[in-house]
Structures are given as C-alpha cells and as structure tokens.
Amino acid sequence: MKKIRQSLIGLVIAIGTLYYTLQNVSYKELETSLKNAELIYILPGLVLIALSYVTRAYRWQILLRPFKKIPVKEIYSPLMIGFMGNVLPARAGEFLRAYLVGKKNDITFSGAFSTIIVERLFDLVCLLTLFVWVFLFNAEIFDPNLTFSGISVQTMVVGFGRFCFILVCALLALMFLLAWQEVKVKSWVNWFIRPLPEKWKGKILFMLSEFALGCQIIKDKNALLQIILYSVLTWTLIVAMNYPFYYVFDLETKTLGSVLILTVMVCILITVLPTPAFLGSYNAGVLIALHEIMGEAEVTAVSFGMVVWAASFIVIFVGAFYFIFRDHISVASLIKAEETESALENTERSSGGGSR
C-alpha cells in the first residue's frame, strides 16, 4: 500500500508539472520546434552523459574499497541497473545497487548501502556548491525588480546562497567528525533527539550509523582526494552535458552561467517534486531556467527539456539492459530483490543497525 501511495503521489505530481510545462505550447509549435532541431549535436551530449557514469563508477569503486577491492568493470552493472531502478517507487534504485554489488562481491547490504549514502553526500556538497556559486556570487542574473510577497527575489536568492554555504560547511564537518569522532557525534545526536518518538529516533540513529560506516574511507587521504576528484569530474560532466543540446535548438544564450542556472533549477525541481523517472519535474526545471530566467522562447525550452530528458534515460536504459542481458538477470528478480532488501533495511533499522 505504501508503494502504491507513493506511485500515485508521484504520478499526480508528474501530471501537474507536465501541465505546467505544456499549458502554453501547442502541439503544432512543438512539432515544428522538434523538426527544426539539429540532431547531430545530440551525439556529443550522449557521450558526456555516458562519461558521467564512468566517473561515478570509479568513485564508487573507491568508496567500496574498505569492504572489498572490486575491478571497475564489475561496478558498471549494479550502477546502471540501480539508476534504472530509480523509476521505481521511492526511487528504489539505491537499494538495488546495494543488493547487486553486495550479492556479487560478498559485501553486506548494510556496508554497500553505507557507501551509497556517502556518495550522495559528496553529490550534495557539489550541488550545494553550485547553489552558492549561482545564488550568492551571480545573483545579478535574477531580475532585481521581481518581488515575491514584497521581498526582492534577488535578495531571497542571496539569502539562500548563504544558507547553502553554511550547509556545505556543516556537512563537511559532520563527515569528518563521524570519521574520527563517531562515538561523540552519536552521543550528541542521541541527546539532541531525546524528545522525538522512538520510531523517529531509531530511523535517525540507523541512518547516522550507515553514514558513519561509509565515512571511514575518508581517513585514507589518497582515497579522499580521489573521491573529491571524481565527484568534481562527475558534476563537471553533469553541467557540461547540457551544452551540446544548446546547439540542437540554437539557443540565444550559450554561456557558462546559463548552463549552471539550468543545472541548478533542474536539480531543485527533481528534488522538491519527486516523480517517476523525474518526468515532469525535470521538464519544469528546464522551462523555469531557460524561459522564465534566461528569456528563451517557451516552445524552445519545452522541446529542449523533452530531448535532454529522453537522451539521459536512453543512456541509462541502454546501459542497464545491456548488463541485465549480459549477466542474465531477470527483471522479476530485480523487483523481488528491491522488496527483499527494503524489508531487510527496515529490519536492521528497527534493531538499531544490525551486525556489521
């Protein structure tokens, strides 16, 4: 029932965001825009998208090193299948990733999942750094005359940029404290969450334990430098992959600032409005960035969002199904694995993290 409810909520959000994106664009306008697209420029975009998963694979290999040294070629299969699994309710692909890499390499689910939590934290630090750059140091791109509830939007984004800067510092501090002062951090958190119900306390402490387990890798300076390098490379590729698509539709503004704004707005929308396969929320983020902020034609922004969204998922699905067929994995077994590992994760959480 929980998964059905999550699916229905995601579907409703997707329909709402798609309506917002398409409400002012006619089918004929959209057809004309897509027919006039220079499709040859999609190829370098596909290459950059694919390369971003290569750098993710190398980073995940390093994060898994404390549990087992795994050849990077063995990382691609669980990585791509897991990203495909993000179309499932609650974006359950992370559970699939942990299950598949653990099963194949004899790593506990808890250990494998902890590396994904740390990976996501490094992604979050990179994303928040982009927020700081766009909202704090490039706030002039927002119309100073635009207000919301009597407050200048430019003032609001500067405040948000400052908040993101503080959050980046806090996350980095938490990661290093958990690596070297895990017991103290857990005691501080346990004291702070005393008023909460036992159910919520258990969830928080479980996630903290998983996070702490994954953070042990950063004690290795060489490993930490490599993780930072691959994180920066990954996010550089995520930003850069949009640029070739600017030429597909010959956008008027082809600047680094425009690409950064596009990346930031898409990330905000797919986070705040989670939908299956990011459908609708991704498109709405593109529309806000390109049309509302950068002033591109609305039909162009809508067409751009559709093409980039499709290209991103072509890479994911082609890669995932290649490894599914190569490793003789049935889709039914993946769905069953996701359900099994979700139940295992809930069991470990209720028992305070289980054995490690």
Image (cartoon, rainbow, N blue to C red):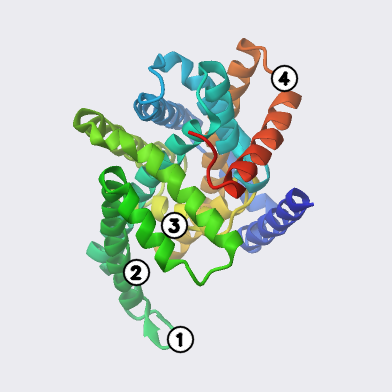
Spatial CA span between label 3 and label 2: 13 Å
Give, as a three-letter code, the residue at label 1: Ser
Task: Tell me the kind of residue under disc 4.
Answer: Ser
Q: Position of residue 89 (x, y in %)?
A: 68, 45
Which of 273 and 184 lies nearest the eye of the viewer? 184
> Which dot, 1 or 4, sits closer to the camera?
4
- Give SS at disc 4: loop
Residue 314 seen in the current view: no
The x and y percentages for residue 208 are: 44, 50
The first of marks 4 and 3 along the sequence is 3
Answer whether labels 4 and 2 touch (C-beta < 8 Å).
Answer: no
Evaluate if marks 1 and 4 touch, with contact meaning CB atoms under 8 Å apart. Answer: no
Say if 194 sits above or below 241 in the image: below
Mark 2, residue position: 160
Tell me if 274 is positioned left or right of 135 in this view.
right
- For residue 164, side relative to residue 34 (left or right): left
Q: Which residue is identified by label 1?
A: 149
On residue 211, the disc is none
Residue type (three-letter) at the residue carrying disc 2: Phe
Q: Which residue is mark 4?
A: 330
